[in-house]
Image: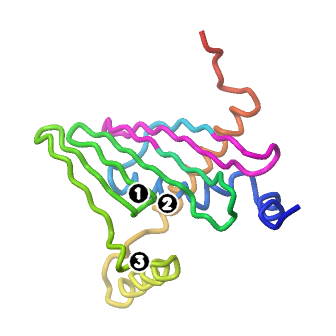
């Protein structure tokens, strides 16, 4: 068994939910607000191992709709997850690829399409993004500003991730699945 397969076999089934999808959930909550209803599905490339593909539909309290897709399926263990977040509100549609690789938004009234892509000349590594996040929190505490993310925000995201995991487990066990007609 190659190292990729050994590592994947040792991870919990919901690793991708808590490791990658959690960030998409945070992003969607930041952009739109609190989810009112969440429906989730997952699949695996190897039976008995972690879910490698996730699809989550979200209905928000304000009427917006969201679709989160997260995939770790691929030949390389070190690859980053493929993530796509789509949000549709009454005003616009937002599409975010891989958290910050590309952001597009479309206004329904002006019919204009806008996009933002970070510069390829100024890449940000995972370590740099973690350092920036931790520094922002420390600076907020040190200077008495409001902290960027509260413990309650983190707890809410964990609760939603647990809901996603429980729904996928339920679908795998045959619960909550209506036969197609």
Q: Residue 97, position in %: x, y?
A: 41, 55
Q: CA distance from mark 2 to mark 3?
A: 19 Å
Q: Nearer the viewer, residue 86 or 89?
A: 86
| Lower position in the chain sequence, tag 3 or tag 1 | 1
Per the image, label 2 sits on a secondary structure element best described as helix
Snapshot quadrant of residue 117: bottom left
Decide if residue 116 is on the left or right side of residue 124.
left
For image coordinates 48% across by 45% down, the residue present is 68
Per the image, label 3 sits on a secondary structure element best described as loop
- Which residue matches tag 1? 27
Residue sticking out furthest to the bottom: 142
- Which residue matches tag 3? 123
Magenta residue check for 56:
yes
- Which residue matches tag 2? 23
Q: Residue 172, position in %: x, y?
A: 73, 34
- Which tag is nearer the camera, tag 3 or tag 1? 3
Boundaries of the magenta span: 42-67
- Which tag is nearer the camera, tag 2 or tag 3? 3
């Amino acid at each position: 068994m190659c190292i990729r397969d050994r590592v994947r076999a040792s991870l919990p089934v919901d690793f991708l939910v808590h490791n990658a999808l959690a960030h998409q959930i945070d992003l969607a909550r930041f952009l739109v607000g609190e989810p009112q209803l969440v429906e989730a599905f997952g699949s695996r490339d190897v039976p008995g191992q972690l879910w490698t593909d996730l699809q989550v539909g979200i209905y928000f309290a304000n009427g917006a709709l969201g679709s989160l897709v997260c995939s770790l399926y691929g030949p390389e263990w070190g690859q980053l997850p493929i993530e796509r977040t789509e949000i549709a509100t009454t005003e616009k549609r937002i599409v975010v690829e891989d958290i910050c690789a590309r952001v597009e938004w479309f206004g329904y009234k002006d019919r204009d399409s806008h996009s933002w892509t970070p510069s390829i000349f100024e890449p940000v590594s995972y370590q740099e993004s973690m350092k920036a996040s931790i520094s922002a929190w420390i600076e907020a505490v040190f200077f008495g500003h409001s902290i960027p993310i509260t413990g309650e925000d983190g707890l809410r995201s964990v609760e939603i991730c647990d809901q996603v995991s429980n729904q996928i487990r339920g679908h795998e066990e045959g619960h909550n699945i209506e036969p197609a007609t």
